[in-house]
Image (cartoon, rainbow, N blue to C red):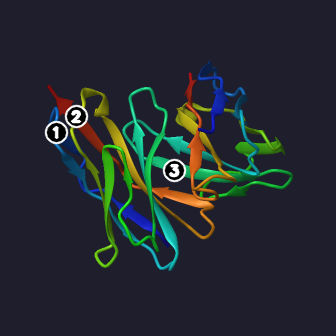
Amino acid sequence: AQKITQTQPGMFVQEKEAVTLDCTYDTSDPSYGLFWYKQPSSGEMIFLIYQGSYDQQNATEGRYSLNFQKARKSANLVISASQLGDSAMYFCAIGSGGYNKLIFGAGTRLAVHP
Amino acid sequence: GAVVSQHPSRVICKSGTSVKIECRSLDFQATTMFWYRQFPKKSLMLMATSNEGSKATYEQGVEKDKFLINHASLTLSTLTVTSAHPEDSSFYICSARGTSGPLAYNEQFFGPGTRLTVL
């Protein structure tokens, strides 16, 4: 069975500062992928970043980077230079077994203050 | 990127009626689509995996006869909530799995969601 844990129900950050959203996972599959999605109040799920379990380097996509620590089973999302438009729910998810399923964490609500 | 649409975006219906929600991949073919349900301030829960040309695979605890899924073509999957009741009110989101590109077989493209309210 797979499990994703996001322990921060809510986070606050000042505009232009960096913020780290925590995500830990549990899986017995040797091959898996970790995803981060953003969900604004409109409800759409926006893909942010992906990290494969065999990737040697941490994934980066613009202002988003994934701090992947395999031994600790953590895949924290780092958002640099926060913007007001970053205020949203953020979900961490794990996929494996051909990625037929994505298991989502409970989510973290991020509020960016001016 | 790949675009997935859902229709309708909002629906309000009376208890006992059936509601059909469409999920379309607009610019790519999707042999596999997924249906999720999200309660307010909660996470997405996978309901079922929809495979083109075959029966859907339902997650444990999801009633097959309540939530009918049809994946009739490579670009369309439908979810029908039969005999809807107020407890079925929720946000339903579909996704389609990519089949090409650097994240082939990894990335799921999500539709904008359908908010169902059953009175």
For marks 1 and 3, give the one nearer the viewer. 1
- Label tally: 3
For marks 3 and 2, give the one nearer the viewer. 2
Q: From this view, report whether residue A78 is shown above or below residue B94.
A: below
Locate residue A1 relative to residue A59 in the image: left or right: right
Locate residue A74 relative to residue B25 in the image: left or right: left
Residue on which the image places disc 2: A111
Residue plotted at (48% across, 47% down): B44
**Circle 1 SS class:** strand
Residue B29 image offset from top left, x and y in percent: 76, 44
Residue B8 image offset from top left, x and y in percent: 65, 23
Residue on which the image places disc 3: B45
Image quarter of the C terminus of chain B = top right
Locate residue B57 relative to residue A85 in the image: left or right: right
Determine crowd level at label 1: few under 14, some 14-19, many 20+ residues with C-alpha closer than 10 A: few
Determine crowd level at label 2: few under 14, some 14-19, many 20+ residues with C-alpha closer than 10 A: many
The image's mark for residue A12 is: 1
Say whether disc 1 or disc 2 marks the residue closer to the N-terminus.
1
Image quarter of the N terminus of chain B = top right
Residue plotted at (35% across, 44% down): A62
The image's mark for residue A98 is: none
Could you tell me which chain the residue with mark 2 belongs to? A
**Circle 3 SS class:** strand
Give me the C-alpha separation between circle 1 and circle 3. 26 Å
Three-letter code for the amino acid on which mark 3 is drawn: Met
Name the foreground residue: A81 vs B24: A81
Residue A67 image offset from top left, x and y in percent: 29, 62
Q: Is residue B60 visible?
A: no
Could you tell me which chain the residue with mark 1 belongs to? A
Three-letter code for the amino acid on which mark 2 is drawn: Ala
Q: Are marks 1 and 2 in contact (CB under 8 Å)?
A: yes
